[in-house]
Image: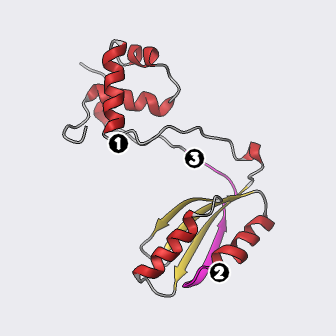
């Protein structure tokens, strides 16, 4: 796949797999108008090319007692490579950090953290985040309601346009 761009059939496969990664190859082939063997070959090529990077199971955080979702802005004292690396390595080791982005603007990093309660958030901030060398400031914003959440990437229009 590195030397070739996905074609319309590949885009259909990718769209269908984003909707349901557990779909059988036979069902997937039927959905994209291929026979099973060529369909499986295309999926394997998409995996080999790292266009499909992995398959996951999405869990409902509320049903698991993870009711607090927080966005945390972190600013470092200095944006030197050693400080950035130390911060990123510390964050990578924390399971409650769902996402972490190096940012432009006022804060250096934006984290999305999911925890069971406010006390857990306090422990995370006080015992872990604030102790990372070079952290200058921490600002938290609680998510009151999740209006939209999706994991499927927007695919090119050519993948969903009906043929004429």
Position of residue 22 relative to residue 157, above or below, is: above
Which residue is at the front of the view, 7 or 160? Answer: 7
Determine whether the residue tagged by mark 1 lies in a helix, strand or loop: loop
The residue sitting at 30% across, 40% down in the picture is 49
Say which mark, if any, is on residue 131. Answer: 2
Q: Quadrant of residue 122?
A: bottom right
Secondary structure at badge 2 equals: helix
Write the start and end of the magenta stretch as one range: 132-149
Q: CA distance from mark 1 to mark 3?
A: 27 Å
Residue 93 visible in the shown view = yes
Place of residue 36 in the rendered image (x, y in percent of width and height, measured from the top left): 37, 14
Q: Badge 1: few (under 14), some or many (20 or more) residues near its Cα, within 10 Å?
A: few
- Between 74 and 24, which is closer to the camera in this rendering? 24
Pick the front one: 78 or 37: 37
Callout 2 environment at 10 Å: few (<14), some (14 to 19), or many (20+)? few
**Residue holding disc 1:** 50
* Residue on which disc 3 sits: 148
Q: Residue at x 24, y 30 (%)?
A: 7
- Looking at the image, the residue that sits furthest to the left is 3
> In the rendered image, which quarter is residue 47 located in?
top left
- Is there CB contact under 8 Å for labels 1 and 3? no
The magenta stretch spans residue 139: yes
Residue 111 magenta-drawn?
Answer: no
The reply to whether residue 161 is in sight is no
Label 1 or label 3, whichever lies nearer to me, is 1
Q: Is residue 62 above or below residue 158?
A: below
């Amino acid at each position: 796949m590195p030397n070739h761009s996905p074609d319309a059939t590949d885009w259909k496969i990718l769209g269908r797999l984003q909707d349901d990664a557990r779909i059988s190859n036979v069902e997937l082939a039927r959905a994209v108008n291929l026979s099973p063997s060529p369909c499986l070959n295309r999926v394997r090529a998409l995996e080999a090319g790292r266009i499909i990077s992995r398959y996951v199971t999405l869990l409902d955080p509320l049903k698991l007692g993870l009711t607090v979702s927080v966005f945390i802005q972190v600013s470092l004292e200095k944006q030197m490579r050693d400080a950035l690396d130390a911060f990123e390595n510390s964050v990578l080791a924390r399971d409650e950090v769902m996402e972490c982005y190096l940012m432009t603007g006022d804060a250096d990093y934006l984290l999305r953290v999911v925890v069971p309660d406010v006390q857990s958030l306090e422990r995370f901030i006080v015992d872990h985040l604030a102790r990372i060398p070079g952290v200058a400031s921490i600002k938290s914003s609680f998510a009151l309601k999740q209006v939209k959440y999706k994991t499927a990437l927007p695919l090119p229009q050519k993948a969903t346009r009906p043929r004429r």
